Image (cartoon, helix red, strand yellow):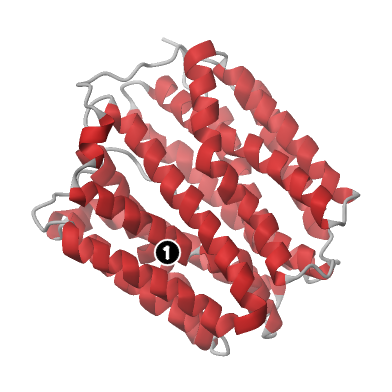
Amino acid sequence: MQALPHWRLSGYYFFYFAFIGAFSPYFGLYLQSLSFSAWDIGLLMSQMQLMRLFGPNLWGWLVDHFGHRLAVIRLAGAVGLAGFLAFFWLDRLPGMLVAMAVLALFWSAALPLVETLTFDHLREERGRYGNIRLWGSVGFIVAVMGTGALLDWVAPVGVLWVCAFILLGILVFALVLPEVPLHSATGEETPIRDILRQPRVLALMGACFAMSAAHGGFYVFYSIHLSGHGYAKTAVGLLWSLGVLAEIGVFLLMARIARRYSLRDILLLSFAAAVLRFLLMGWAVESVAAMIFVQLLHGLTFGAYHAAAIAAVNQWFPGKAQGRGQALYSSLSFGAGGLIGALVSGWAWDDWGAGWTFSLGSVFALAGLLLVWRWVTAETVFQAAKTPDPVQ
């Protein structure tokens, strides 16, 4: 039996999520330094969600039909780095939009394929996944804190150098990852259209769309919001890290929580927390204590919510339909929902201001809460069939 390439897989996760830690909180600040409008910033950043709408399905289809999974992972690393390097000499919207689309299309290809590669290496030792995936969260925290501290001393263009270095790390680890034969899914084939006719499934997908849309303003403008109210870049990084630590804490406690509360209860609490979180984010930014509380709520609005949603999808999409269910969940929530949230927040930011922009996030969360309350039944049980992916 082939030995598990633990450090190579862990290293890839470290750099992959380190890129999110450097890019998501701080690239908007760099765009702001180039005098882009809020709409332009939202449009550029939304390319990451747009490509997640169909990118993983496209790359997954190509691998399913033609193989060469590892070649696609390596190609994604190389082209993603090349696309990002274009930012060093681009400063106008059309060119940056193309570069961002190229980066997002290839960057979005890698993680789902690396996930399948990791589980194919693990085989019957899937309990070891957490020890590998943990390094992704470590990478995010190191990057978000380190980049924030750096930007207190250098110009915002420094984020380009940090992200380029991290993308180079992704490519290096992609080149040393070993292949393993694909482990085909087994189980009963269920027509996807029959599953999608169920009101609870439609309600869950709608609620997941709403939750990601609610987070759109957070991912695009939260760092700009804090920086505009006098928070140092180091403090911004600490607050982002606190959110990740909160979600990790919830993941560690989820098995215990699931024994006491139903999936419906967890989802209702998560959406209610999101309504409160984005109201406070918009209107209580002057209070450091409120911002700490806002980031602690990330453990519910992403951690508990994502764990419960993943469990529901695994439960309601049986057998071979699980893969399609997960792809649909990812596309509708992080793809379509994140895209709409980013665009709506970019449109509202200049005209309505931060308070009302984040309040729109609360409206999206309230819509998701009502969908879950009306159509997700109390007898639904929590079955954590797959380890959640922190840091989205």
Question: Where is mark 1, residue-wise?
Answer: 246
Q: Nearer the viewer, residue 204 or 300?
A: 204
Figure check: 333 above or below 294? above
Tag 1: Cα neighbours inside 10 Å, few (<14), some, or many (≥20)? Answer: some
Q: Nearer the viewer, residue 64 or 339?
A: 339
Residue 24 appears at what percent x and percent y? 63, 58
At horizontal 46% and vertical 72% (from top left) the residue drawn is 361
Side of 101 relative to 129 (left or right)? right
At horizontal 27% and vertical 42% (from top left) the residue drawn is 313
- Of all residues shown, which one is farthest toward the left? 379
Side of 207 relative to 257 (left or right)? right
Residue 33 appears at what percent x and percent y? 82, 69
Asked which secondary structure carries label 1, the reply is: helix
Figure check: 85 above or below 299? above
Residue type at mark 1: give it: Ala
Figure check: 118 above or below 356? above
**Which quarter shows the N terminus?**
top left
Q: Nearer the viewer, residue 113 or 22?
A: 113
Q: Nearer the viewer, residue 159 or 69?
A: 69
Residue 223 appears at what percent x and percent y? 64, 71
Side of 79 relative to 262 (left or right)? right
Can residue 133 be seen in the rendering of this structure? yes
